[in-house]
């Protein structure tokens, strides 16, 4: 006798479209925030016969149901924190990139989804995380608190009660000292580029989790990746560049550094890592073989960003400036009864050039100089200045990419400096129009 109990609701169904395609829909639970049903959907294109289309649709339905089952009964109870720790252990990346990843993980991932089981992370959970980052990088969730300028314990009001300031997260109005130094929290969104880094971290970790058999599918594969931020280089104008160089030349060594960076378009670490045996002043060529990385006070020598050596031709005037710079270095070395090391650094704070200049130091010095001149810019903009001047001069993109050390045969250069390439192209069209011969034609209609 057939059972008279309640029928179990079907977990999935297949519907047919007028085009002959089949739409597969599978029940995947209820959204914890909205209470709405979650359904996984996929469309199967029409095959030669309806029967073939139906067989393919059934395979898709089985696959989607397995995905749902794996998420409900994950193979491991390991958390996202544990997955990230294991992923960082095996990840082979450059030290500064790793430090950036760890910073993003500690700030944005561990406090939000770090304690969730890997197999129970849902697509909407990750997209909700991205949405909250677009609203506030401090994960305030609408609460009000005082953002202190220091994490150390400090006195709020030195002239009255000398009480300690409220900790972050406590609902307390700022005292008089904090009104001058600290401030009430104001929501600031995380940049699109930083959200893409968070997405790359999660994507890489969960893909590794699939490879290790921790989970069968990665929910990050179904998350819409944050949009790529549009490059917006802001090089100094010709007048600003002249003012910066004139100000820098009050100290010839510093002026040489700024002139060299402005002309070659090299990254700050590459300039700091340049050695005298990388310069061939007789031929006018600089070879960038290494770069100086820095995190806080720790510095180390590493490969250039693209891990490729590159040669950059120097103009005669820059060669003359470098020859004079070498003469000053030799004079300082003789004054303390030593010599400039053959493999010494071109820009060094010590007489024998045995120690490199700190990348952070040159960035801060350049920033202070620009502030004195009332120019809103930073050291990396000299790289943009070099690139845009080359493009304006009609140099082809591949050559510009080669001088800058861009990978991809010019694709990165073209994407970064699109507006300047279009501007140069418009000037080329105007120049051609001015020189183009014109046909003899009648201006009248007869």
Image (cartoon, rainbow, N blue to C red):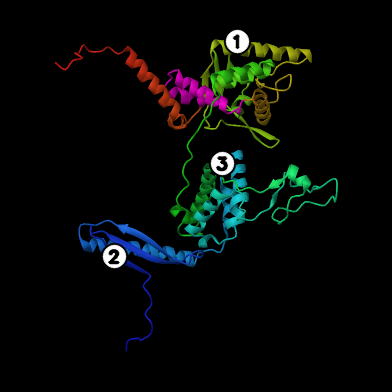
Residue 198 image point, x, y percent: 54, 48
Q: Which of marks 3 and 2 is in front?
A: 2
Residue, far bottom: 1
Residue 218 visible in image? no
Camera-side residue: 328 or 178? 178
Q: Earlier in the sequence, mark 1 or mark 3?
A: 3
Is residue 37 part of the magenta span, yes or no?
no
Mark in front: 1 vs 3:
1
Q: What's the CA distance linking mark 3 and mark 2?
A: 47 Å
Q: Which of 347 and 93 is in front in this view?
A: 347
Q: Distance between the residues labelled 1 and 3?
A: 39 Å
| Magenta span | 375-404
Q: Where is residue 178 in the image (x, y as percent from the top left)?
A: 75, 46
Residue found 61% across the figure and 18% down from its top:
243
Residue 179 sits above or below residue 353 on the image = below
> What is the chief secondary structure element of the magenta stretch?
helix
Q: Is residue 111 above or below residue 159?
A: below
Which residue matches tag 3? Answer: 93
Q: Quadrant of residue 20?
A: bottom left
At label 2, counting other C-alpha atoms closer than 10 Å, the crowd grade (few under 14, some 14-19, many 20 or more) is: few
Q: How crowded is mark 1: few (under 14 residues within 10 Å), some or many (20 or more)?
A: some
- Label 2 sits on residue: 15
> In which quadrant will I find the C terminus?
top left
Q: Nearer the viewer, residue 323 or 380?
A: 380
Q: SS for tag 1?
A: helix
Compared to residue 34, the image places residue 425 above or below, namely above
Which residue is nearer to you in this view: 320 or 274?
Answer: 320
- First in residue order: circle 1 vs circle 2: 2
Q: Mark 1 points at which residue?
A: 320
Residue 392: within the magenta?
yes
């Amino acid at each position: 006798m057939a059972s008279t109990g309640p029928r179990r609701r079907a977990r999935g169904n297949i519907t047919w479209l007028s085009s002959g395609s089949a739409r597969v829909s599978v029940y995947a639970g209820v959204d914890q925030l909205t209470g709405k049903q979650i359904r996984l959907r996929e469309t199967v294109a029409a095959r030669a016969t309806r029967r073939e289309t139906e067989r393919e649709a059934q395979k898709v339905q089985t696959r989607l149901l397995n995905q749902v089952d794996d998420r409900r009964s994950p193979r491991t109870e390991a958390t996202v924190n544990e997955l990230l720790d294991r992923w960082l252990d095996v990840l082979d990346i450059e030290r500064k990139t790793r430090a950036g990843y760890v910073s993003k993980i500690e700030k944005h991932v561990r406090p939000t989804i770090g304690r969730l089981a890997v197999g129970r992370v849902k697509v909407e959970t990750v997209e909700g995380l991205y949405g909250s980052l677009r609203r506030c990088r401090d994960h305030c969730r609408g609460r009000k608190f005082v953002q202190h300028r220091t994490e150390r314990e400090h006195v709020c009001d030195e002239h009255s009660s000398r009480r300690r300031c409220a900790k972050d997260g406590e609902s307390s109005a700022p005292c008089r000292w904090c009104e001058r130094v600290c401030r009430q929290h104001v929501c600031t969104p995380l940049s699109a580029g930083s959200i893409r880094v968070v997405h790359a971290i999660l994507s890489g970790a969960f893909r590794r989790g699939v490879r290790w058999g921790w989970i069968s599918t990665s929910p990050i594969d179904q998350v819409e990746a944050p949009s790529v931020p549009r490059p917006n280089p802001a090089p100094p104008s010709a007048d600003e560049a002249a003012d910066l160089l004139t100000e820098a030349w009050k100290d010839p060594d510093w002026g040489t550094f700024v002139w060299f960076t402005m002309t070659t378009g090299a990254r700050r670490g590459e300039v700091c890592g340049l050695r005298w045996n990388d310069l061939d002043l007789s031929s006018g060529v600089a070879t960038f073989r290494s770069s100086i990385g820095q995190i806080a006070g720790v510095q180390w020598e590493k490969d250039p960003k693209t891990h490729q050596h590159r040669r950059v031709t120097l103009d005669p005037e820059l060669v003359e400036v470098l020859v004079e710079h070498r003469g000053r270095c030799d004079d300082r070395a003789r004054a303390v009864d030593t010599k400039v090391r053959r493999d010494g650094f071109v820009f060094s704070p010590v007489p024998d050039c045995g120690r490199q200049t700190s990348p952070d130091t040159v960035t801060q010095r350049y920033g202070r100089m620009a502030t004195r001149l009332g120019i809103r810019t930073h050291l990396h903009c000299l790289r943009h200045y070099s690139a845009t001047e080359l493009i304006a001069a009609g140099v082809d993109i591949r050559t510009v990419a080669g001088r800058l050390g861009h990978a991809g045969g010019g694709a990165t250069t073209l994407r970064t400096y699109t507006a300047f390439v279009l501007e140069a192209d418009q000037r080329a069209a105007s120049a051609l129009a001015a020189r183009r011969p014109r046909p003899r034609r009648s201006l009248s209609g007869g």
